[in-house]
Image (cartoon, rainbow, N blue to C red):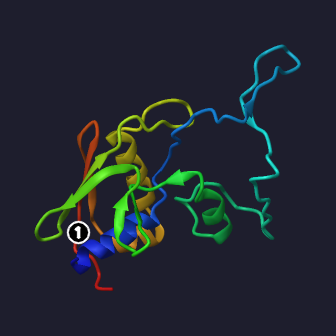
Amino acid sequence: MNKRFMMSSFLILSAMTVAACADPEPENAVTGTNEQGDEETPVTTEETENSVSLAWNSQPPTLDPHVTNTNVVRDLARPVFEQLVTFDESYEPIPMLADSFEENEDGSEITFYLREGVLFHNDEEMTADDVVASMEKWQSGGAPAAAMGDSTWQEVDEYTVKLHVDELPSP
């Protein structure tokens, strides 16, 4: 696998792209009514047999992983935000929110074919427009901006996104 693809895969994996979930209302969700009699948002009940409680020794400055690189935000956001690709047990890039992806011969473009039917917390389906907006936001500042240079994201169609890779620094 060429260095440019590995570097761009690493950078893409570093991005927390979009918040999505396959099941908008888990089995253990419960609802109730508030004092006005309106139905409340589903709340997941705690299951002690299959759950782990964790505590952090600091408060997150934000819950937006695009604007900070603090460990507490990274740790809290990791189970909430999914990436286009992730790594398998051999550290090879594999699809996550992408159904598949391919790189052109010189590594200057990576095309991501998105999974269909992936829902946001509000039951809206994730599309290429959402991915482009998320990646542009992530790439707009800090380390991602420096690492990605002038790379650009393009919506090809509703479920296809293309990354045009700028000259990346050598690892």
* Quadrant position of residue 74: bottom right
Q: Residue at x 55, y 31 (%)?
A: 122
Assign the N terminus to one quadrant of the image: bottom left
Q: Which residue is at a point 27% across and 76% down the rendered structure image?
A: 168
**Residue under pointer 1:** 166
Q: Is residue 145 left or right of residue 54?
A: left
Front residue of 35/168: it is 35
Callout 1: SS: loop
User: Looking at this view, is 10 or 26 the one in front?
Assistant: 26
- Residue most toward the right? 35
Q: Position of residue 14 (x, y in %)?
A: 45, 67
Is 65 in front, or is 43? Answer: 43
Q: Is residue 84 above or below residue 89?
A: above
Measuring from the top left, give residue 94's x and y in whole percent: 35, 62
**Vertical arrangement, residue 141 with respect to residue 18, above or below:** below
Judge left or right: residue 88 versus residue 67: left
- Image position, residue 169 (x, y; %): 29, 81
Q: Residue furthest front?
A: 49
Q: Nearer the viewer, residue 144 or 55?
A: 55
On the rendered structure, is 161 left or right of 86? left
Residue shown at 41% from the left, 54% from the top: 96
Position of residue 126 relative to residue 60, above or below, is above
Farthest left residue in view: 105
Q: Which of the 4 image quadrants contains residue 118?
A: top left
